[in-house]
Image (cartoon, rainbow, N blue to C red):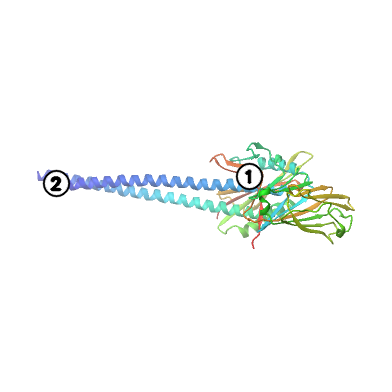
Amino acid sequence: MANNSGMEMRKGVIFTFDALVAVVIAVMALTVLMQMVSLRTSEWYKEIALYNSAQDFLTSRDKDDTLVGAFSKTPGNITSTFTGLIASQIPANMVARLNFTICRYNQTASAFTCNQNITAGSNGTTPVKSVVRRVFTDPANNYYGVAVMEVWYR
Amino acid sequence: MKRGFMLTAITVVLFMLLIDTALQYSENSSAYSKRISEMIVSNKVTYTFDDINQDVTRIFGVSITQKAPYLVIQDSMPASNITTNLGLYENFVRNYYLPPEIEAKFLNSNEQPITLNNLSASIFVSPFNLNYGYDNFSKNNLLIQVPVSQVGAIPNVWYNLTVTSGNFSIPPDTITWDTLPAGCCIILGVTIYDGAAVVPYNYSGIFNPTNSPPGHLNLSFVNQNCSMEIQIGSQYLLNLTNHGCNISSQISFSLNDSNTRIYLPEKISVRDVNYNTSKKDNINLVVTKLMG
């Protein structure tokens, strides 16, 4: 009788021990999961910061007519001007690249003639995290342009 | 035995609580991610809306500045190609600017889709319902009106006009009105420069836009012959008709409410098709607000 009781007691303890090990494993799994979710959340915040920086840069350059000024510049001048502006105005932990599409409406051909190969800023290949676009125009001279800014963290 | 089972039961309950917490945490974080991505999308939609507004203001050819209590609209007459440029701009925006997930529509005041070159040549200033507009985009007939109920909200108006294409046909100090603006109680200032820009013509007085017959002034210019007609009254704060002059205008109002909004009757609707997030509002002209 006493032996049976001792046996059952041992079984119960083993079972409990087994369950406790399972709980410990589950807690560890949960901790890892929470860490991953938390990392993802901070990634979202970082993306918002990237997006806002690019948006502020393009909005300011549109309002002070720097973007419109690109219409009267050579591709080389556009690249050097905007590379300098990016270097001085984008936060140091961010990297940016600007791609311009500069078009002029050709009245004879009734079509836009565009130069889409103007780039300023970094040539890095890190996966881009945020993209902001801005349209600008000089209607008196039939010029229309789009600046596409790609930004990512160093 | 009993103790073993007790421990087992407690462990099972704890384990279930753990699973429940994990599930709830996962649900919350996915809702949070959704909120953040919606935030970025709303930001993008609003940004696109503002971007188009800024360019429409530029194509309109007006520059609006506000330094309370003054609102100043700078403009030039005549204008050419505004309708064509609006059409080209829309074409460019659709083909080169808007990413596939963003959709933009232009709507008339009845919310029916229109093309951008069908905008009306009228600007409204709220909350006064003041209308600054033209017969059409050739900008040869400037009409400024305000409802009778709002006359008291505009204590002063100044019309500064510069005719760059010619000189006064008679000395400015001999210029006279056919009929003087009359009535009470908007304070009026009119200053007109000619191409020589040495001695301007100045007039100051008081008027009421409902007064009839209206104040009427006809001015002729030489060197490059042209003329313009100014009427003040008969429902108009200003009715300016241009006959061949190049005119730069600076129209100033003092307003008793600085919380103004300057807009066109037409609307823009911008929508992100993936998230079905949209913004629809009147086309707001960009106003430079000065402090101090």
Q: Is any part of residue A117 visible from this angle? A: no
The answer to which quarter of the image holds residue B259 is bottom right
Looking at the picture, do discs 2 and 1 lie on one chain? no
User: In front: B24, or B219?
Assistant: B219
User: In front: B99, or B81?
Assistant: B81
User: Circle 2 sits on which residue?
Assistant: A6
**Amino acid type, label 1:** Asn
Q: Is any part of residue B202 visible from this angle? A: yes
Q: Mark 2 and mark 1: span between their CA atoms?
A: 84 Å
For disc 2, the chain is A
Please provide percent x and percent y for residue A123: 62, 52
A80 vs B10: above or below: below
**Residue farthest to the top, as pictured:** B112
**Residue displayed at 65% across by 44% down:** B97
**Amino acid type, label 2:** Gly
User: B239 left or right of B114?
Assistant: right
Q: Secondary structure at mark 1?
A: strand
Image quarter of the C terminus of chain B = bottom right
User: B205 left or right of B173?
Assistant: left
* Mark seen at residue B282: 1
* Mark seen at residue B196: none
